[in-house]
Amino acid sequence: MFALDLTSPASKQLPPVFNMPKSELQCYGECVYSTMLDLLSRINSGKTPLDRFISVVAWSISTVRPLWFGVAPYNPTLGETHHVSKGNLNVLLEQVSHHPPVSALHATDEKENIEMIWCHAIIPKFTGTSVEAHVHGKRKLKLHNYGETYELNSPNFLIRMLPVPANDWIGNVNIRCPQTGLVAELSYTTQSFFGFGSSRRMVKGKIFDSLSTKILYKVQGHWDSTVTLKNTDNSDVRVIYDAKQVISGLQPPIVKDPKRVWPTETVLVWGDLSQAILNRDWEKAREAKKMVEERQRELQRERELKGQFWVPKHFRVSCTKEEGWDCLPVQKSVQNAPIVTL
């Protein structure tokens, strides 16, 4: 998920014809709430730490989604929010920085006593034939019933123009539970430079005990189809992730209570532009996009004249050279949202 900066005068601005009708903030949220299976409950029902860890690995793979080539989501505006509920899971995202773009996520399920905290900072690396968006920041999944915290990172997003146009997720993902000592190392790979080979959208790796360094399982498959787990003791193989079961037939969120929707909600910020894109009314789309951009510049000028600094409403943000970006939620839990998805 990668979007070019909309408000920087020096940046290249995408015309609406190259935008998909949703914000990058919504794309992040969909990775958490847009699933056909309740993967979080499955994690919580694991009887042993290893059972739960394997389910966390499967859930982490589910957050990697295929995207269309040639179109990009909108770059979120500063302070933009996305607040959605799916059953007992309440998800809240906020764009906490614009230069550089940083998105924060907080999700809680009070029934399962599960909490998620993410912080994503996108840093693009340009080459002559591709753009690789490095996703910096931290992801934490907390199972409060067990006192377990799972720490993981995100793969990077690759957009390749030549010689074979494609986009894909690449790089290494580490999943670690300090309380149990279990670790997973996953590698996301893509096809060769010339488009040959079967490694596109492949994920492979291992699960091991960091205390004994014993490899317990081998992980292998394709994140857009199925991923298997092989027991190193008896060579038994089983499917731990099936993309068709998890992300097929998904329904978009619907506004259940319009009066409770915040003015910063992505559906309001980008609503006119998204509708124009869906209608293929490109003149109206250009006008709508220009209005969003000009409004952001106007708000920035007002803050500068008043000597004010923008402060996120829902997160406390910090950034150090050693630790990178970190986003801590202001509230202990996320309230029910006026926007829901089934």
Image (spheres, grey):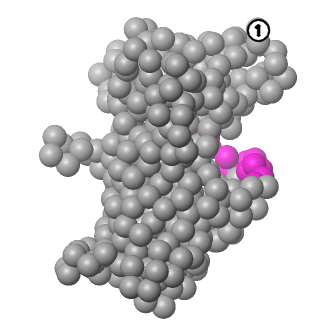
Q: Is residue 69 above or below residue 156?
A: above
Q: Main secondary structure of the magenta part?
A: loop
x, y percent for residue 104: 43, 47
Q: Residue at x 49, y 62 (%)?
A: 220
Identify which amino acid the numbered label 1 is placed on: Glu
> Which image quadrant for residue 341?
bottom right
x, y percent for residue 86: 67, 63
What residue did someone put label 1 on? Answer: 283
Of all residues, the one furthest to the right in this rendering is: 279
Q: Is residue 124 above or below residue 41?
A: above
* Foreground pick, 251 / 52: 52
Secondary-structure class at tag 1: helix
Q: Is residue 263 above or below residue 306?
A: below
Say whether residue 257 is magenta: yes
Residue 202 in sight from this viewpoint: yes
Q: Is residue 320 left or right of residue 158?
A: left
x, y percent for residue 72: 59, 27
Q: Is residue 70 left or right of residue 298?
A: right
Characterize the local packing of mark 1: few (<14), some (14-19) or many (20 or more) Cα atoms within 10 angstroms.
Answer: few
* Foreground pick, 272 / 64: 64
Residue 28 in sight from this viewpoint: no
Q: Residue at x 67, y 29 (%)?
A: 20
Query: Quarter of the image containing the C terminus?
Result: bottom right
Q: Is residue 197 above or below residue 12?
A: below
Q: Residue at x 18, y 43 (%)?
A: 320
Q: Which residues are magenta?
A: 250-265
Q: Is residue 127 left or right of residue 201?
A: left
* Foreground pick, 114 / 165: 165
> Which image quadrant for residue 183?
bottom left
Say whether residue 252 is magenta: yes
Q: Residue at x 44, y 18 (%)?
A: 129
